[in-house]
Amino acid sequence: MPEKMGNNISHVPVLDGQNYPLWSILIDIELSARGLWDVCSSELCPTTDASVINNWNQLSFEAVQLILSRLHPEIIVTGVNANTVENTKLLWTKIHEKFASQKVTNRGRTWVRW
């Protein structure tokens, strides 16, 4: 059986707004390695099974905790609210929409850094 991952995630930089490309790759890998990516990328299917709901909620809170621990305090204050804390997919989407600019000039800047 695999060992439980440690809590050290210092290799994931704190998202400050300028480092989104690197941050998103590393946090995505970290969430996936911990089995938390599904709660960030999909919604819970309607179900009446309480154990499934409880497990989903636990994973969701773990993912939110991990994501928030790697956000600059100013980003938390301006972008996180009760809705995003309770809906990990919404939190992930809001972060992505805010920082993954589709502007050609920003994409060019990202590729120059690459």
Image (spheres, helix red, strand yellow):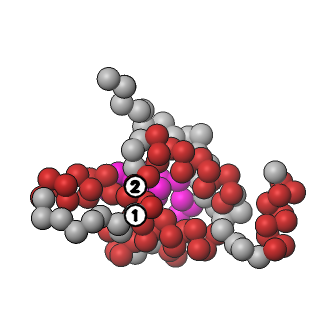
Residue 66 falls within the magenta-colored stretch:
yes
Position of residue 108 in the picture relative to residue 35 (left or right): right
The residue to which callout 1 is attached is: 42
Q: Which quadrant would the N terminus be assigned to in this image?
A: top left
Few, some or many residues within 10 Å of mark 2 (<14, 14–19, 20+): some
Q: Position of residue 50 (x, y in %)?
A: 12, 58
Q: Quadrant of residue 80?
A: bottom left
Magenta-colored segment: predominant secondary structure: helix
What residue appears at the point 40 percent right and 49 percent down from the top-left corner? Answer: 36
The residue to which callout 2 is attached is: 38
What residue appears at the point 23 percent right and 52 percent down from the top-left corner? Answer: 55
**Above or below — where is 93 with respect to 14?**
below
**Above or below — where is 13 with respect to 11?**
below
Whether residue 91 is visible to the viewer of this picture, yes or no, is yes
Depth order, front residue of 35/9: 35
What residue appears at the point 45 percent right and 61 percent down from the top-left corner? Answer: 41
Q: Could you tell me how far apart the alpha carbons at marks 1 and 2 are, in whole angstroms?
A: 6 Å
Instruction: Give the residues in magenta.
Output: 61-73
What residue appears at the point 66 percent right and 68 percent down from the top-left corner? Answer: 100
Q: Quadrant of residue 61?
A: bottom left
Position of residue 95 in the picture relative to residue 41 (left or right): right
Q: Which residue is farthest right?
A: 112
| Contact (Cβ within 8 Å) of mark 1 with mark 2 | yes
Helix, strand or loop at label 2? It is helix
What amino acid is labelled 2 in the image?
Asp
Q: Position of residue 16 (x, y in %)?
A: 64, 61
Whether residue 64 is visible to the viewer of this picture, yes or no, is no
Few, some or many residues within 10 Å of mark 1 (<14, 14–19, 20+): few
